[in-house]
Image (tube, rainbow, N blue to C red):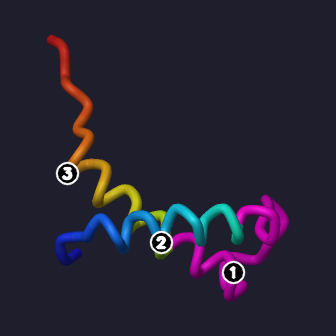
Amino acid sequence: MEKVSKEQYEFALIRIEELLPLVNDNTPANDKNAVELSVISDIVIAYEREHYPIEQHL
């Protein structure tokens, strides 16, 4: 995945809030809202891994 900008990340967070009420455990995986939620979630994950990494303690 390409590097995610802060603007893309912020848009993704807003869009996730809009999509969450439309998708639940009974929503088919191929539903357009479920697919979009999955893609948008990947954007948020990519941004947060880069900018907010979780430290590993051994």
Closer to the observer: label 3 or label 2? 2
**Residue 26 shown left or right of residue 58 in the figure:** right
In space, the residues marked 1 and 2 are separated at their CA atoms by 16 Å
* Rendered view: 58 above or below 34: above
- The residue wearing badge 2 is 11
Q: Residue furthest right?
A: 26
The region drawn magenta spans 20-38
**Residue 49 shown left or right of residue 30 in the figure:** left
**Residue 41 belongs to the span the image colors magenta:** no
Closer to the observer: label 1 or label 2? 2
Q: Secondary structure at mark 3?
A: helix
Instruction: Rate crowding at label 3 as few (under 14), some (14 to 19) or many (20 or more) other CA atoms within 10 Å.
Output: few
Give 31 or 55, whichever is nearer the viewer.
55
Q: What type is the residue that disc 1 sits on? A: Asn
Give 4 or 36, whichever is nearer the viewer.
4
In space, the residues marked 3 and 1 are separated at their CA atoms by 26 Å
- The residue wearing badge 1 is 33
Mark 1 or mark 2: name the one nearer the start of the chain.
2
- Assign the C terminus to one quadrant of the image: top left
**Residue 36 belongs to the span the image colors magenta:** yes
Specify the label residue 50 is tagged with.
3
> What residue is shown at x 48% (from left), y 69% (from top)?
12
Q: What type is the residue that disc 2 sits on? A: Phe
- Assign the N terminus to one quadrant of the image: bottom left
Q: Secondary structure at mark 2?
A: helix
Q: Secondary structure at mark 1?
A: helix
> What residue is shown at x 19% (from left), y 23% (from top)?
56
* Rendered view: 55 above or below 35: above
> What residue is shown at x 18% (from left), y 14% (from top)?
57
